[in-house]
Amino acid sequence: MRIFVCIKQVPDTETRIKLTSDSQGIDPTGVKWVINPYDEFAIEEAIRFKEANDDVQVTAITVGPKARVNNALLTAMAMGVDDSLLVNTDAALDALTTAQALANAIKAEGEFGLVLAGKLAIDGNVSAVPLMLAELLGIPHASVVNSTEYSDGFVTAGREIEGGTTEKFKLRLPAMITANKGLNKPRFASLPGIMKAKKKPIKEVSLDDLGIKTESIKVKFTNFELPAEKPACKMLGGSPEDQVNELVKLLQEEAKVL
């Protein structure tokens, strides 16, 4: 069985973001790029499935500029993924075009039994690409999954909903699963795994190879702005009673929330 794991590189949460001089995007200079944290749960799920079943091949797939995203693919392969598929492009694709590129690349590889991804990417928080991909591949999907059970030709996916209740879906394979925190505990890449990853193949394709035109991009973002600086903290003095009175006054007259 062939399993595809969709991964994305995102800026590390501790990276200080700067905008380009024309405010039309993020300045990549000095940005530390990492695998989207939710995608790590998807990678771990695929590797565990492989370890529990014979004749399983796990392929990581991503879309982005080769010079940058190769590191993400190498990390995935160091964790235990068998090989990688890179859709090499510098274009800023929207969710639908990204899903189309992934779908065409997966279809070109032949039959597959399972597609995994994180529930969302922490940079855009759109949570759209995996579900669009499932629709384009014509397969069932379950999102925000934190438990799985596999049987012959099926996967039962569990997810938490309101009130602490768990709902489960039994999906016929091939299917799409988007992983949530709690599905598993992602492993660290070992030194032997890192050395082996350097010898594992990374297949590269372009948007043209997949029949994807950048002219079909329907959503573009412009005029980026950084959040306004937070005002300095105001310390209140005096007795507890004075502090309470002053706080109520500030909430009414300055914050205007009362």
Image: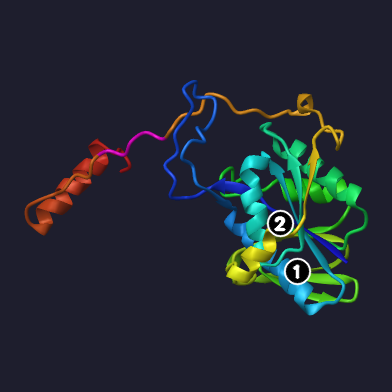
Q: Nearer the viewer, residue 30 or 137?
A: 30
Residue 8: mark in rendering: none
On the image, the x and y values in percent for residue 127 come to: 66, 48
Under circle 2, the secondary element is strand
Q: Nearer the viewer, mark 1 or mark 2?
A: 2
Tell me the residue at 42%/42% (across/down).
Answer: 16
Tell me the residue at 45%/38% (across/down).
Answer: 17
Under circle 1, the secondary element is strand
Tell me the residue at 68%/41% (across/down).
Answer: 66
Q: Residue furthest top?
A: 22
Horizontal placement of 206 versus 250: left or right? right
Horizontal placement of 246 versus 56: left or right? left
Residue ID for mark 2: 117
Residue 157: mark in rendering: 1
Earlier sequence position, callout 1 versus callout 2: 2
Q: Total marks drawn? A: 2
Q: Is residue 111 visible?
A: yes
On the image, the x and y values in percent for residue 157 come to: 75, 69
Q: CA distance from mark 1 to mark 2?
A: 14 Å
Instruction: Give the prevailing secondary structure in the magenta stretch.
Output: loop
Q: Which residues are magenta?
A: 227-231
On the image, the x and y values in percent for residue 96 come to: 76, 38
Q: Residue furthest right?
A: 110
